[in-house]
Image: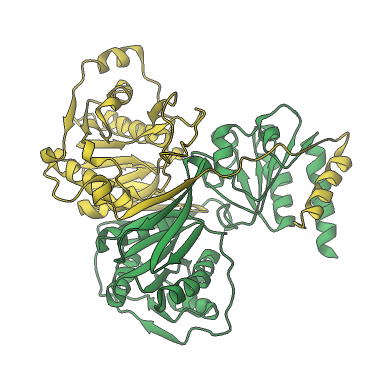
Chain colours: A yellow, B green
Amino acid sequence: MKIVVSVKLVPDTNADKRIDPGTKRLVRTGVENVLNPFDEYAIEAALQLREKRNDGSTVTIFTMAPESGKEIVRKALAMGADDAVMLSDAKLEGSDVAGTAHAMSAALKKTGFDLILCGTQSTDATTGEVPGFLAELLGVPGLTYIRKIESDGTTINAQRETDTGYIDVSVSTPALISVTKAINEPRYPSLKGIMGAKKKEIKILSLPDVEFARAAGTDGAKTEVLELATPPTRQKGRVVTAADGAEGASAIFDFLKEKKLL
Amino acid sequence: MRDVIVFIEQRAGTPRRVSFELATKAQDLATALGGKTHGVVAGAGAAQAAEATKPYGLGTLHVADGGATAEYLIDPLVDALEAVAKAAGPSLILVPNTMIGRDVGSRVAARLDAGITSDAIDVTVSNGKVSTVSPKLGGLTITTCAFKNTEYGVVSVRPNVFAAKAGTTATASIETTALPPKTYAMKIGSEVEEAAPELGVEEASIVVSGGRGLGGPEPFTTLIKPLADALGGAVGASRAAVDAGWIPHAHQVGQTGKTISPSLYIAVGISGAIQHKVGMRTAGTIVAVNKDANVPIADFADLLVVGDLFQIIPELTKRVEAEKRH
């Protein structure tokens, strides 16, 4: 089985971030990019599937990002993936959800796959809309919010999260699956993995390489950003030290009354 | 875009409250665009859900509960929405920003070659152009996005930001959209309920969350749930509590969980690290209870009570219950 894990590079949540009021873009200086935290679960799920199948199945990391993101892709390879493909093209800058999904679809068709795994959403744009969009464009079933996967190589049996539990779903490959964090505990790269990743192939594809026929990036986007505003930061509020339960409860009760929340 | 189409998410005949919020909002938007409003209700129980949606005043409710709608999860819903959208012509499609809503919205956008914006907390029309406002980067920025053209556009709307108001005029016509019998690739099996159906954190206007400070799973049932019930709210949790296996992931608020904007958020035994903060910092009011005054949440909670949560929460629940009886 050829398993492709689609990942995204995002600004580190822990970094101190701000928006440049002039360019209306994130100030990248001092903000490191990292692997989208959701995607680590997808990589782990792919590695576990490969290990369980033990039939020559392979795991390829795929991402749409500038070539400078190579080192982060290498971290994904260090977890144990076999190789990587990057769709890197300056023309992709300014892509919206639709544009991103179309470009990814073209590249993934070129790369080929039996199964695509991805995270539920990214921590920067947080749309959660790429998996469904992509599945539709690729013409394969999309299983989203998956918390458990089993496969015999051709059939995928999975559990989809619901608000109260889960629902069993199954498909035949090829398919696309987005996973939630409930699926596993991602491994840390081993020293051997880190050393080995240096020798693994990262193939770079451009838009002409994947025969992308649509307008790309800002030109192809169906939506445009008009404004980026910085919301007022929350201020430190009242602090009450409660000697006992009644005192603490009163402090909250009175506060809720004052705010007309009760 | 002229008409406004709302995807009415429902389960076994009961629409989610966010469906009514979108139905209410759709009418203002359609007036501004000079178009009509539609609701699309699909899946088992659709006819019953349409009846429940009637008071919210959508022009036409399109019901699809035949064909394969009961046997498949997402695909028939997408088919039903696509059919109504194609008949209506270039239109604005509103879906709830929920697991089902995002799936249906993104897939129908792909089919209609539409633009899509997500997690909107406002939708406006100016000179026939539709813009949406969404928090991005974990609430660090508030982004205003516009659809460049007037073809199809899809917006996923955050629950709990628009009021649901039953209008003076109820829906006049319910139309049945016949979906042909069809076999889809994704088969669904049995559904397993691990918890009783309750209000989800995304939709609740009050959320009471528990974290590491609870020390185990029991306080979620003995402390957090009773307070949430007394306030008419939902139970949330921090990543630490979910990772410890004390409560299912569906309750998690934060970076790898849900991003919410309730009017009141009560954090119990939660330190408020950045990964939690990004999921709840757009709440109206934040109250925290912690034994430690030097936790990150102290810097952004509107009220921090430093004390023993095991004593404070039961007392507070009693006070709230007594208040509600008045």
Q: Can residue B262 be seen in this view?
A: yes
Coordinates of residue A207 in the picture (x, y in percent): 16, 40
Quarter of image, res B35: bottom left
* Residue at 51% over, 69% down: B25
Could you tell me residue B14's position as x and y percent?
52, 70
Q: Position of residue B253 (x, y in %)?
A: 56, 43
**Left or right of residue A4, residue B143 in this image:** right
| Frontmost residue, A149 versus B23 | B23
Residue plotted at (71% across, 33% down)? B298
- Above or below B320: residue B303: above
Q: Which residue lies furthest to the front in this view?
A: A22
Give the number of marks.
0
What percent of the width, then of the height, locates residue A131? 32, 48
Point out the residue furthest to the bottom here: B172
Closest to the observer, B13 or A98: A98
Residue B68 appears in view = no
In this view of the protein, which residue sits in the foreground, B274 or A60?
B274
Rendered-image quadrant of the N terminus of chain A:
top left
Q: In the rendered view, does A226 fall on the left or right side of B250?
A: left
Task: Say which residue appears at 40% left-offset and 39% top-offset.
Answer: A23
Which quarter of the rendered picture does the C terminus of chain A lie within? Answer: bottom right
Q: Is residue B74 above or below residue A188?
A: below
The quadrant in which residue A37 appears is top left
